[in-house]
C-alpha cells in the first residue's frame, strides 16, 4: 500500500490495511506518545489510534509537540 | 496624527500601500503581549519595537544565563544575571524610545494570565514548555484573544495563528498534553540558534498584519519549517468539533494550570 506521510510517499509491502498504532510502530516513528496524527485532513483522537484503519492512498501527517529549545523534554529517541 | 519624527522613522513602511499613515497609527496604537523573552520572544520584541508597535508587554520570570545568548539576541553578555524583562525593556527603549514597555517578571499561570492578556490586542506565545503553551491557548480562546503559537525543536519549528472561535486552536491539534508517564527522561534537546529567529519573525509578522488588518493570517494551517532541508510545509488544520476548549461541547471553560504537562526538568528548575 502507498501512503503519503508528512508530504512524502511511503509504501508498505504486503500490507493492505493497518491501524494507526500499527503504522506508528511500523514506520518507527520517534516518540509516538508525542505525536498527533492527522488522517486525510482530520485530526484523530489518540484513543482511536488502535481502531482507525489506514488504507492505500491515505494521507497522514504526524505532528509533534514542540517546546522552546531550552527545556525541551522528550523521551530519548529509540 | 503622526509627528514629523515618526514619519521619518517609519518612512520605509509608511510608503507601503498596505501601511500608510493610517496603518502606522494602528501600529502605534497597537498592544502586543510577548510571553517569554527567550529565543522566540527576543527577536519578536526587537522587530515589533522597531516597527513602532506602541505598547509591548513582556512576561518572563527568568534571569539571563550565558547559555541563552546563542539565540536570545535581545540580551547581551553584560546582561547575564539580570532579569530578562529588564534587559529586554532596556533594548526596546534604546531602539525606539516611543514604545511603552510593560514588564511582568513572573510565571504566567492560571491565576494571572486572564488579567494580563486583557490589556492587549494580540498575544504571542514565545514560551518553552508545554504547560505554558496549553495555558496560553486556553486563556486566549476563553478570553477571545487572537494569538500566535510557535514551537521549536532542534532544527525544526512550527507555528500557527489562532483566531478564537474562527480557526483551529492548539487543542484542536493537540487536545491534551502527552501522558505524564510518557515522559521518562529529560533530554536537553537543544535548538539551532537561528531557528527561533525564523519562527519568531513569522510570529512578529502575524502580529503586525493583525494590527494593520492586512493580508491573510496564518490561521487554519500549521506552518512547519525544517532548517536542515530549508523546507517549509503547510498542513491544513480544521477546527475540531471535539476540541476540549473551542469545540461543540467544551469541557474547558476557564483556565487551569496543566500540571500534567510540566515535565520533570520543569519541576527541577522551578
Image (cartoon, coloured by chain):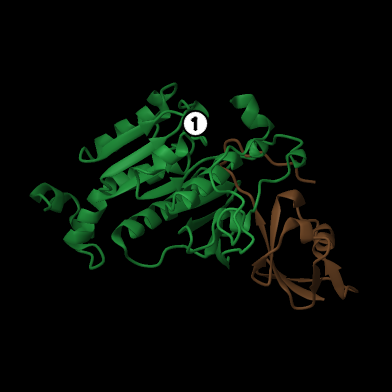
The total number of labels drawn is 1
> In this orientation, does residue B88 appear?
no
**Residue B212, relative to residue B31: is it above or below?**
below
**Would residue B89 be found to the left or right of residue B268 on screen?**
left
Placement of the C terminus of chain B among the 4 image quadrants? top right
Residue B82: percent from the left, percent from the top?
41, 23
**Nearest to the observer: residue B196 or residue B149:** B149
Colour green belongs to chain:
B
Task: Give coordinates of residue A48: x percent, y percent.
Answer: 78, 61
Colour brown maps to chain: A
Residue A52, percent from left and from top = 80, 67
Residue found at the far left of this picture: B4
Look at the picture and state if B85 lies above or below B230.
above
- Give the camera-side residue of B226 and B63: B63
Location of residue B75 in the rendering, given as x and y in whole percent from the top left corner:
40, 32
The residue drawn where x is 59% and y is 44% is A67
The answer to whether B57 appears left or right of B39 in the picture is left
Amino acid at each position: 500500500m502507498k501512503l503519503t506521510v508528512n508530504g512524502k510517499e511511503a509504501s508498505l509491502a504486503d500490507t493492505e490495511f493497518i491501524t494507526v498504532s500499527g503504522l506508528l510502530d511500523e514506520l518507527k516513528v520517534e516518540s509516538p506518545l508525542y505525536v498527533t496524527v492527522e488522517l486525510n485532513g482530520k485530526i484523530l483522537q489518540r484513543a482511536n489510534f488502535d481502531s482507525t484503519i489506514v488504507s492505500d492512498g491515505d494521507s497522514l501527517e504526524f505532528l509533534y509537540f514542540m517546546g522552546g529549545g531550552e527545556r525541551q523534554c522528550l523521551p530519548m529517541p529509540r | 496624527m503622526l509627528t514629523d519624527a515618526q514619519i521619518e522613522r517609519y518612512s520605509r513602511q509608511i510608503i507601503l500601500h498596505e501601511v500608510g499613515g493610517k496603518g502606522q497609527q494602528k501600529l502605534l496604537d497597537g498592544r502586543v503581549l510577548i510571553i517569554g523573552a527567550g529565543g522566540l520572544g527576543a527577536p519578536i520584541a526587537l522587530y515589533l519595537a522597531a516597527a513602532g508597535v506602541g505598547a509591548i508587554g513582556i512576561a518572563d520570570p527568568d534571569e539571563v544565563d550565558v547559555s541563552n545568548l546563542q539565540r536570545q539576541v535581545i540580551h547581551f553578555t553584560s546582561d547575564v544575571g539580570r532579569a530578562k524583562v529588564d534587559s529586554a525593556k532596556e533594548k526596546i527603549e534604546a531602539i525606539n524610545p516611543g514604545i511603552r514597555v510593560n514588564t511582568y517578571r513572573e510565571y504566567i499561570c492560571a491565576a494571572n494570565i486572564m488579567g494580563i492578556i486583557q490589556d492587549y490586542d494580540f498575544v504571542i506565545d514565545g514560551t518553552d514548555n508545554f504547560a505554558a503553551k496549553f495555558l496560553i491557548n486556553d486563556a486566549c480562546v476563553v478570553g477571545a484573544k487572537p494569538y500566535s503559537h510557535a514551537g521549536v525543536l532542534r532544527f525544526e519549528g512550527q507555528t500557527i495563528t489562532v483566531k478564537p472561535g474562527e480557526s483551529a486552536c492548539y487543542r484542536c491539534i493537540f487536545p491534551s498534553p502527552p501522558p505524564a508517564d510518557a515522559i521518562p527522561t529529560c533530554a536537553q534537546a537543544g535548538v539551532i540558534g537561528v531557528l527561533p529567529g525564523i519562527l519568531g519573525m513569522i510570529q512578529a509578522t502575524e502580529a503586525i498584519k493583525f494590527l494593520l488588518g492586512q493580508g491573510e493570517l496564518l490561521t487554519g494551517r500549521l506552518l512547519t519549517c525544517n532548517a536542515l532541508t530549508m523546507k517549509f510545509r503547510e498542513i491544513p488544520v480544521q477546527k475540531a468539533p471535539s476540541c476540549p476548549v473551542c469545540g461543540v461541547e467544551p469541557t474547558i471553560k476557564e483556565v487551569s494550570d496543566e500540571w500534567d504537562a510540566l515535565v520533570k526538568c520543569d519541576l527541577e528548575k522551578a
